[in-house]
Image (cartoon, helix red, strand yellow):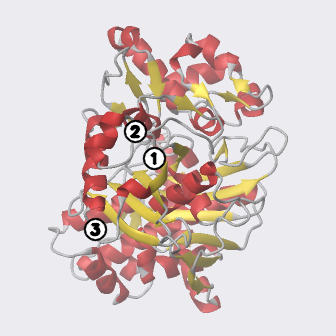
């Protein structure tokens, strides 16, 4: 008698700003068995106790991970005991600090927090702009290194207790496995990595006075970052010893999930923030650090793979904000349908999707979100919804122009059919104002993390990991619509440039 073949599953965990999502993927077919979000009916908020600050509780992330995995285990066909590896993706640039007993010392300072700009500026001036760009590929800005410096300066009692410094995904791996590891990608997204020496930046360590022992052991992205502890396994209904074989920031992972691994390929996403991410094999950087260069998931010293990242802080969060401000009575699907009933340009109404921290592409200028051109006798909630989605698309174009200044020549961009790309209005505005052909795929961050875990376990290679990736839509620019949107965009840009000038 031939024994029935046992199911083999991979678990992907996505630590988002608004929610945690987990997916169980069949290792043989790469298909999703089930996916669960927590919370599933609301979105987690961001704590902002002072203007420009943004924090979240890492304990809430962990609670949401546990709740989501347990709920996943209740879904038909989901045998968590058959999970062979775990992959983790997470909101980038956050700071989590723990003491000697692995207790969190303060709430996480997350990606859109702007308090550490001055610390980054001090480092930039001391190290030198050219040296920072040449070696870090970025200005220190308000990335994780600068945030840690802020804690050291402003909260010395907390800093003295710190034994480990982590990004959000590292913390979840710690809770799962009692192990802390670091990667070149993790170091580079925090501006801790020197790409010329291929070591943690001595310039950053020396200027800020950081102890390198604060970080976890350096390992490849695709490797074992700990194994599921007996206590966590019991709590989650999983198998003790299950390895964590992949960890990466959300935008790197989004690119991975879309099979964007080779030079010249680009990906985009429009979740809480909006991002365009392009892969190159050169150690390149923007002279003004408006776009940022990080080690991609498959980066190696002798085979560089650098992700050029354009970030717009206020994408999906703008869509959520306008929904809440109109009473929260419409679902996102209803909002999209209402927006589709309004012609391009939203009757002269313009929206600027900022106001969620200092914008890197605007050289860390703080420009508030807002509308212009409001006509009280004309504009309805439908106009508001359309104007917000068009404004987000215009912000993508603004950043894309910067990427093109830096040599981007791509004409096709890939995205998962999720978040704002579920909206026909947004997708067509994006395509027609950027001139890019958009390919949409059935995938998301948690699925990408699961596939990443399979690569880390040795189940797949880069060449075959995404051979079953399903393309569901191709949307090309329309010449007539491009002309319409170009006129609207140029008007929008003039007003934005005026706001930037006023805020400098």
In the image, 64 versus 114, the foreground residue is 64
Element under label 3? loop
Q: Which residue is mark 1?
A: 90
- Which quadrant of the structure image shows residue 426? bottom left
Q: Earlier in the sequence, mark 2 or mark 1?
A: 1
- Mark 2 vs mark 1: in front: 2
Element under label 1? strand
**Residue 116 x/y as whole percent:** 46, 27
In the image, 170 versus 158, the foreground residue is 170
CA neighbours of label 2 inside 10 A, class few (<14), some (14 to 19), many (20+): many
CA neighbours of label 3 inside 10 A, class few (<14), some (14 to 19), many (20+): few
2 and 1 marks in contact (CB < 8 Å)? yes
Residue 75 numbered tag = 3
- The residue under the point 65% across, 89% down is 479
Q: Which residue is mark 2?
A: 172
Can the viewer see residue 42 in this picture?
A: yes
**Residue 221 x/y as whole percent:** 62, 42
**Residue 355 x/y as whole percent:** 37, 49
- Establish if 175 lies above or below 259: above
């Amino acid at each position: 008698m031939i024994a029935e073949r046992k199911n083999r599953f991979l678990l992907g965990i996505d630590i988002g700003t608004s929610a945690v999502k987990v997916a169980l993927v069949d290792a043989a077919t790469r298909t999703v068995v089930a996916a669960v979000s927590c919370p599933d009916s609301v979105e987690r908020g961001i704590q902002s106790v002072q203007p420009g600050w943004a924090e979240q509780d890492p304990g809430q992330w962990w609670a949401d991970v546990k709740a989501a995995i347990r709920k996943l285990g209740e879904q038909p066909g989901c045998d968590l005991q058959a999970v062979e590896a775990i992959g983790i993706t997470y909101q980038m640039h956050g700071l989590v600090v723990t003491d000697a007993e692995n207790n969190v010392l303060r709430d996480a300072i997350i990606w859109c927090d702007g308090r550490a700009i001055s610390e980054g500026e001090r480092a930039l001036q001391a190290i030198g702009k050219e040296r920072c760009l040449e070696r870090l590929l970025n200005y220190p800005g308000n990335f994780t290194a600068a945030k840690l410096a802020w804690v050291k300066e402003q909260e010395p009692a907390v800093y003295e207790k710190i034994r480990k410094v982590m990004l959000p995904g590292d913390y979840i791996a710690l809770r799962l496995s009692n192990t802390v590891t670091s990667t070149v990608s993790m170091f580079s997204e925090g501006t801790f990595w020197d790409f010329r020496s291929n070591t943690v930046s001595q310039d950053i360590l020396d200027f800020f006075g950081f102890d390198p022992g604060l970080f976890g052991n350096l390992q490849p992205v695709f490797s074992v970052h700990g194994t599921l502890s007996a206590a966590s396994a019991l709590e989650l209904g999983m198998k003790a010893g299950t390895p964590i074989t992949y960890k990466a920031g959300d935008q790197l992972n989004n690119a991975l999930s879309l099979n964007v691994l080779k030079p010249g390929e680009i990906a985009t996403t429009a979740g809480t923030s909006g991002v365009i991410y392009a892969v190159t094999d050169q150690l390149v950087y923007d002279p003004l650090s408006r776009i940022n260069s990080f080690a991609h998931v498959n980066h190696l010293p002798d085979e560089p793979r650098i992700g050029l990242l354009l970030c717009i802080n206020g994408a999906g969060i703008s869509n959520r904000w306008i929904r809440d401000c109109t009473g929260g009575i419409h679902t996102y699907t209803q909002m999209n349908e209402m927006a589709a009933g309004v012609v391009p340009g939203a009757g002269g109404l313009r929206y600027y999707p900022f106001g969620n921290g200092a914008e890197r592409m605007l050289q860390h200028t703080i420009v508030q979100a807002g509308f212009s051109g409001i006509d009280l006798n004309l504009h309805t909630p439908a106009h508001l919804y359309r104007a917000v989605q068009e404004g987000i698309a215009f912000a993508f174009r603004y950043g894309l122009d910067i990427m093109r200044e830096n040599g981007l020549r791509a004409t096709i961009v890939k995205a998962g059919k999720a978040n704002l790309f579920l909206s026909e209005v947004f997708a067509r505005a994006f395509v027609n104002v950027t001139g890019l052909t958009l390919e949409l795929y059935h995938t998301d961050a948690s699925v990408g993390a699961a596939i990443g875990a399979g690569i880390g376990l040795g189940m797949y290679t880069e060449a075959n990991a995404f051979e079953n990736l399903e393309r569901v839509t191709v949307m090309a620019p329309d010449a007539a619509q491009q002309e319409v949107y170009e006129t609207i965009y140029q008007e929008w840009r003039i007003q934005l440039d005026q706001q930037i000038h006023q805020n400098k």
